[in-house]
């Protein structure tokens, strides 16, 4: 989908009805809202599982955490699976300390995340 | 890293981010929403809301909410007794109090929060006044809130309260400033209307010069604008023009309306009017500078032969020099009982003859430029020509004279005359 907001588009790709969304280096209000919008867009377009890849993310601030909680709620409401992958050790500890890991699965990397997702029907990749 | 240290760092970071959000004076509601997210994110709280309390209406208006259902009611009544009670608790209330207030709140708003669990209510209080409230539900950990959690929430809530309070103060200041501006504009309008009434009164007294004061005001305005004066100063000089003859109010009516040229006694009586005008105008706080001085000095001359004080050259305020020329121009271009109005050629000849002795060269030059612009059509408005009226139909014929006078004044020929006096 073309980005009409003038913002840097969120990197995302779909594998079947799983969307993989790439978080930026610093997950704050601005970048968090972009991810939240993208996640909601993917859920609305029928994705049954979301993988948020934190491979580039060095820091998540409080607003970022709050926005991720919103994504968790949205996924729950859509009965979609949500998995975090490639989380660095600092962020992993933060998520654990705050209890996010009770609400969402955390995978070592994208492959592990995809393996956690229920069987796919379509494995052809596309990038947006 | 120890969990406690990490928790502490996360809280400090939240406080620092909150400070930045609150300092941002842009969109108030966006600031409040961001602050609310910071608060939720600091402890990973799953649901809650932040509201602003409207004391006048007795309402809590929710600005941001999460996990309170599809469309939580945004405006909730909050009785003044309850508000006073919450204010007395402040943001540093105990865990039991925060839980108890959450229970009371849910009880008061059963319909709005039928299926929602709210664990804590933290009032936002500044200077013992309720500013708003934060409602908080469960944490992501599933654990109960602790006293330590409440301290963190309390610290963040105090900052949010200050943010709302500052915004309200700013709104109040802006409102007051707008009110003052309107009041000032109103007073200015009254002042101008009063000035016009005075100008009319002055001109009614002198049956031969009806409309003179208003015209002098308008000629002065045209000259000042051509000289590049500010809008405010142009307004001021127009007022000075309207009032320059106010001293005539104390001059004997028979003298003013004498059909003959003044004799020595009458001239003496008449020459009282600039100083008298000053005395009338000086006690008034005018919104423009030097109005009384312009009335006092509009009969002064550059060569020092004017009255009442015989000032010379730069001793005469610039505004008075403008009013002097405007006054003379109107006097020469209107009929008097003892003579008919002068032809423009003769008026300009008078200007040429008296520039540097009576009139300031730069003022004469500005007047000529403004006049020429109107004749040549480079000036959209024809104010000067309208003021001259239909008595002067052949104004175009003086273009060469104006051009020559401007050229002589710009070239310094007339200035040399001025410096010789």
Image (cartoon, grey):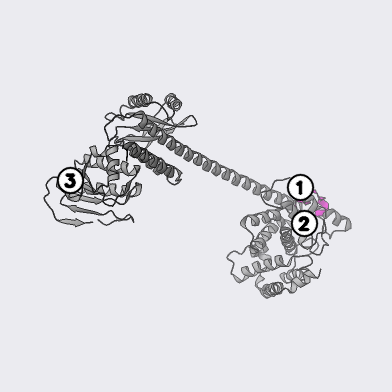
Q: Residue A48: which disc?
A: 3
Q: Residue B86: which disc?
A: none
Chain letter behind tag 1: B
Chain letter behind tag 2: B
Across and down, in percent, residue B338 comes to 81, 62
CB within 8 Å, label 3 to label 2: no
Query: How far apart are the two marked residues, 1 and 2, measured between alpha carbons?
Result: 14 Å
Callout 1: helix, strand or loop? helix
**Can residue B353 be seen?**
no
In this orientation, which residue lies closer to the viewer: B220 or B36?
B36
CB within 8 Å, label 1 to label 2: no
Quadrant of the frame with the N terminus of chain B: top left
What residue is shown at x 26% (from left), y 49% (from top)?
A54
**Which residues fall within the magenta stretch?**
B245-258
Q: Is residue B249 magenta?
A: yes
Q: Residue B297: which disc?
A: 2
Image check: A99 left or right of B183?
Answer: left
Callout 3: helix, strand or loop? loop
- Above or below, comparing residue B354 to residue A17 in the picture: below
Query: How far apart are the two marked residues, 3 and 2, measured between alpha carbons?
Result: 89 Å
Marks 3 and 2 on same chain:
no
Q: Residue furthest right?
A: B264
* Residue that badge 1 annotates: B280
Q: Is residue B109 magenta?
A: no
Across and down, in percent, residue B364 comes to 71, 67
Quadrant of the frame with the C terminus of chain B: bottom right
In this orientation, which residue lies closer to the viewer: B171 or B48?
B48
Image check: B322 left or right of B34?
Answer: right
């Amino acid at each position: 989908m073309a980005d009409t907001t003038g913002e840097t588009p969120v990197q995302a790709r779909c594998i079947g009805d799983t969307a993989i969304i790439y978080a930026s280096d610093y997950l704050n209000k601005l970048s968090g809202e972009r991810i939240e919008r993208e996640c909601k867009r993917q859920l609305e377009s029928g994705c049954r599982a979301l993988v948020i890849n934190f491979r580039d993310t060095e820091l998540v601030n409080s607003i970022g955490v709050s926005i991720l909680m919103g994504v968790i709620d949205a996924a729950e409401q859509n009965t979609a699976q949500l998995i975090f992958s490639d989380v660095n050790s600092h962020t992993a500890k933060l998520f654990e300390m705050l209890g996010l890991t009770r609400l969402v699965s955390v995978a070592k990397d994208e492959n592990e995340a995809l393996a956690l997702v229920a069987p796919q029907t379509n494995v052809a990749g596309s990038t947006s | 890293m120890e969990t406690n240290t990490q928790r502490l760092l996360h809280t400090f970071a939240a406080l620092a981010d909150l400070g930045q959000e609150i300092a941002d004076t842009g969109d108030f509601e966006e600031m409040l929403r961001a602050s609310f997210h910071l608060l939720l994110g600091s402890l990973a709280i799953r649901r809650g809301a932040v509201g602003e309390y409207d004391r006048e209406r007795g309402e809590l208006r929710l600005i941001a909410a999460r996990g309170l259902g599809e469309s939580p009611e945004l405006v909730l009544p909050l009785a003044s007794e309850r508000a006073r009670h919450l204010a007395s608790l402040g943001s540093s209330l105990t865990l039991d109090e925060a839980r108890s207030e959450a229970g009371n709140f849910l009880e008061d708003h059963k319909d709005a929060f039928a299926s929602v669990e709210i664990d804590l209510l933290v009032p936002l209080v500044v200077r013992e006044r309720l500013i708003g409230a934060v409602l908080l539900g469960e944490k992501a950990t599933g654990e109960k809130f602790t006293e330590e959690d409440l301290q963190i929430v309390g610290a963040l809530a105090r900052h949010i309260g200050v943010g709302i309070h500052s915004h309200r103060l700013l709104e109040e200041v802006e409102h007051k400033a707008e009110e003052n501006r309107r009041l000032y504009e109103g007073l200015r309008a009254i002042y101008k209307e009063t000035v016009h009434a005075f100008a009319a009164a002055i001109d009614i007294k002198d049956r031969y010069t009806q409309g003179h004061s208003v015209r002098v005001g308008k000629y002065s305005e045209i000259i000042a604008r051509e000289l590049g004066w500010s809008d405010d100063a142009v307004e001021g000089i127009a007022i000075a023009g309207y009032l320059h003859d106010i001293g005539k109010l104390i001059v004997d009516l028979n003298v003013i309306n004498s059909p003959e040229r003044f004799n020595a006694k009458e001239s003496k009586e008449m020459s009282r009017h600039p100083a008298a005008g000053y005395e009338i105008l000086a006690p008034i706080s005018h919104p423009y500078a030097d109005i009384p001085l312009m009335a006092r000095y509009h009969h002064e001359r550059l060569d020092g032969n004017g009255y009442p004080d015989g000032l010379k050259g730069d001793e005469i305020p610039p505004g008075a020099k403008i009013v002097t020329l405007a006054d003379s121009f109107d006097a020469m271009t209107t009929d008097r009982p003892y003579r008919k109005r002068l032809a423009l050629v003769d008026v300009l000849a008078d200007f040429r003859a008296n520039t540097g002795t009576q009139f300031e060269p730069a003022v004469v030059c500005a007047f000529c430029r403004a006049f020429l612009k109107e004749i040549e059509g480079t000036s959209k408005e024809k104010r000067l020509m309208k003021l001259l009226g239909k008595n002067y139909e052949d104004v175009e014929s003086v273009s060469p004279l104006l051009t020559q006078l401007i050229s002589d004044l710009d070239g310094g020929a007339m200035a040399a005359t001025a410096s010789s006096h």
